[in-house]
Image (spheres, grey):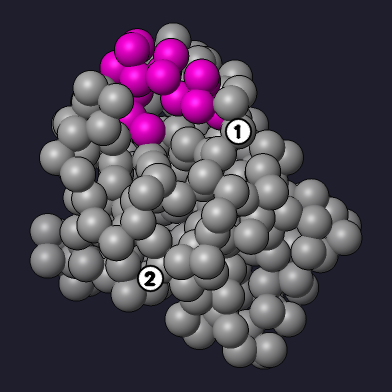
Amino acid sequence: MKLLNSGNAKTKKGEKLGWKTFGIHLAPSKLSGFNTCQFATAGCSESCLNTAGRGIMTTVQKARIQKTLFFFKNKEGFLAELRKEIRAAIRSCERHGLKPCFRLNLTSDLPFHKFGILEEFPDVQFYDYTKDYKRSLDWLAGKLPSNYQLTFSRAETKESQEQAAHLLSLGMNVAAVFRKSLPETWSGFAVIDGDNTDLRFLDPKGVIVGLVEKGKAKQDVSGFVIS
């Protein structure tokens, strides 16, 4: 079972900057019967991009569930296959003159940094969005691998908003979804266009990574999408 994909419409935008993103689409939240998004909120779950683009296809959804079951039922086998595919992706990029980067949580929020994968490829860039506040604090404190970049994802709950504000004050970037268009600033912080590319590790520090509502998020009334 192939785990990594070689990009979607957004991640492919990075190729014009010389980077090729490879990522894993797992079934989000509890869709597979296992929880891949421990800190998901109601608004986040309802607005998830899992069904965006090709994700709406039944075959794609089944494949994501199968990958998720593979991870939870045979983690050793899953990680062995992942290592193999990362090596192949690196070789492919070398042949095409591109730099590889890896986002292992395209539609999940699992702690891949705990499995030794990042340390095995120290010269390769990994990155994620996360709602895990502790992981974010650990990243800021330099406790996570140096080739791993994190962007905190703001949700609609009071707790998440407080966490986002604190992380911003410490210099971490926070992703936030906006209605229709992006403001120049929000809550006193500059807003950059996070839809230009997915290469979050190239962003300036201490900014809001603005994302315009897409798919189901257009119907959000929870506050996950900022009007």
Residue 7 disc label: 2
Q: Is residue 165 visible?
A: yes
Q: CA distance from mark 2 to mark 1?
A: 31 Å
Residue drawn at point x = 38 percent, y = 40 percent: 175
In the rendered image, residue 112 lying in the magenta stretch gets the answer no
Image side of residue 156 versus residue 179, left or right: right
Q: Nearer the viewer, residue 54 or 70?
A: 54
At which x and y percent is residue 200?
A: 29, 44
Q: Tell me if 47 is positioned left or right of 178 in this view.
A: right
The secondary structure type at the circle numbered 2 is: loop
The part of the image, by quadrant, that contains residue 145 is: top left
Q: Which mark is residue 157?
A: 1
Say whether disc 2 or disc 1 marks the residue closer to the N-terminus. Answer: 2
Write the start and end of the magenta stretch as one range: 160-174
Amino acid type at mark 1: Thr
Q: Main secondary structure of the magenta part?
A: helix
Residue at 41 percent across and 19 percent down: it is 165
Q: Position of residue 171 (x, y in %)?
A: 29, 17
Q: Residue at x 50, y 84 (%)?
A: 54
Is 110 positioned to the left or the right of 220 in the image? right
Q: Check contact, mark 2 vs mark 1: CB within 8 A.
A: no
Q: Residue at x 12, y 58 (%)?
A: 17
Element assignment for label 1: loop
Q: Amino acid at mark 2?
A: Gly
Q: Nearer the viewer, residue 205 or 63?
A: 205
Q: Residue 203: x percent and y percent? A: 20, 38
